[in-house]
Image: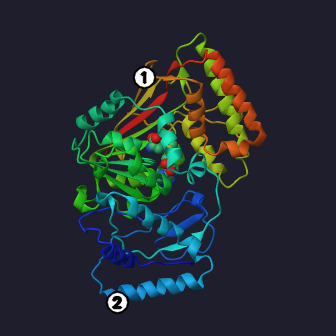
Amino acid sequence: MVGFCDSNVLKWAYDRLCIPAECYLRVLWCAAHPDAGLLATGSGMNTGPDPDPVDPIPYCVAGKTTRRHYVYLKCLVLVSLFVLLQPLAAFRLRPIAVEFARVRRLPLSHRCLNMSTTTTITAAPKVETPFTTGAIQQDANFWREYIASRPSPSEDFFRVIQDYHTSHGDPSTAIAHDVGTGPGNIAERLLRYYDRVVGSDLNQNALAAAPHLVAPDLVSRLTLVHSAAEGLADAGVVEDNIGGGGKTNLLTVSECIPLLDAPRALGAFRSLLRPGGTLAIYFYGRPIFTGGADPARLDALYDRIATRICSFLLPFKGTPGFPIHQRAAEALFSQLDSIALPSEEWADVVRYKWNPDFPLLFNSQGGYDFDLVYVDRREAGETTKEIHDRTWWQDEWDADRIKAYLDSVYPGYIAKAGDRYAEVEEGIEEFREALGGGAVPVTFPVVLLLATRK
Ligand SMILES: C[S@@+](CC[C@H](N)C(=O)[O-])C[C@H]1O[C@@H](n2cnc3c(N)ncnc32)[C@H](O)[C@@H]1O
């Protein structure tokens, strides 16, 4: 064990900082992902490296706040002593300090600590995983550019989700929960349909950026929760005072499911959703060029550059993160058919596939040092709808946008590329020339899984 913190101390500190009790933000001291070099548990000790690199364990309980101040002071003294005695404690308590500072920067409606937490934080091996590792240290600028470079789902797309939600199970729209919310870009879109939205993510830098990137008139209805998806069920997420008694009407997982331990995450999603609530998991892939003199050449050029970039990240095989790279690639190569939605738990499963003749994978096999395998866990009774629509999520992209997209898909790849980065620059210039210096229309392959919680 390397540390503890009685959160009543923090509560007391917040009281002294005059943050009104009615202003509420659940800050869940949930697992710091191994990517952050930290692992936390709520159950006491974690003395060795975590055997499962994607097994972040939540460690938060909402607690009583009625102790006398001398108890707080006593705890404060103990914490101070602890910090003095543990050479590494300052480093290991850093997430708490960062979170504390973050909450101070949030609008009043987003600030409040309501914790009674004993936490154990221990060093865990650093594991390289797709996207998450590269993004974990990035600041608000990365997330601003991320939002600008990524495709923006059309309103029609959200209407497909809403039509499903209102025609299956319980059509209430009190609360939605966006898992892997990152900078809150999709949570923001859900606020048009739901009274409140919870956005959760294990990346606290992304969560810290969210209040600055979500429209100011909407942000007061957004609650941010720092938690790994797999740990959401145990953490308790939504307090009664924002409705729902911890349960949600809609749960979305946008551009995130391949990064998760899907069976564990789905167990958590099921316990968060109200019976009759809707699960909406989706993922979009690479751009499909639909204009210009030679769209097929542009598709091939994109594929060549993206595959080369992925190869800069090798090796995957033989590294601690290999199983995660493998399962993420498997989910995308399988167009999310590898994501099982067992009929004992989920009803009315519909799998939409827009433009499925293009891969969801951002790059081809050549970017990997393992074989891609199509895994199909669909059950009898599910519906799969394939739609070929080359105007779906239509946008206009030029060479700079393609570069920005690649930068956001493979965060941190430039450092790994070293001198080889020149190849990417050459490829982008080739794009610019093929596009005649302008922009062309693009569309995307998109897979959306919809299900009703039984
Ligand atoms: C590609 S971003 C998607 C952001 C946003 N949902 C969107 O659609 O643009 C993936 C997000 O998933 C988060 N993520 C990865 N693994 C996670 C996990 N185990 N639990 C919760 N979030 C996770 C990452 O931190 C990141 O913010």
Q: Amino acid at mark 2?
A: Tyr
Is residue 40 rendered to the left or right of residue 167? right
For the rendered model, the colour scheme is rainbow
Closest to the camera, between mark 2 and mark 1, is 2
Question: Who's the residue at 60% across and 51% down the image?
Answer: 133
Q: Position of residue 112 (x, y in %)?
A: 32, 66
Q: What is the crowding at mark 1: few (fewer than 14 residues within 10 Å), some, or many (at least 20)? A: some
The number of discs equals: 2
240 shown above or below 131: below
Cα distance between the residues tagged 2 and 1: 61 Å
Could you tell me which secondary element the residue under label 2 belongs to?
helix
Whichever of callouts 2 and 1 sits on the residue coming sooner in the sequence is 2
Q: Which mark is residue 326?
A: none
Quadrant in which residue 363 is drawn: top right
Asked whether the viewer can see residue 343, the reply is no
Q: Amino acid at mark 1?
A: Trp
Is residue 107 rendered to the left or right of residue 254? left
Question: Who's the residue at 32% across and 30% down the image?
Answer: 160
Who is closer to the viewer here, 47 or 118? 118
Q: What is the crowding at mark 2: few (fewer than 14 residues within 10 Å), some, or many (at least 20)? A: few
389 shown above or below 171: above
Q: Position of residue 453 (x, y in %)?
A: 32, 46
Asked whether the viewer can see residue 158, the reply is yes
Residue under label 2: 70
Is residue 393 rendered to the left or right of residue 417? left
Question: Who's the residue at 32% across and 76% down the image?
Answer: 16
Q: Position of residue 387 (x, y in %)?
A: 42, 21
356 shown above or below 170: above
Q: Which mark is residue 392?
A: 1
391 shown above or below 23: above
Q: Position of residue 240 (x, y in %)?
A: 24, 61
Quadrant in which residue 350 is drawn: top left
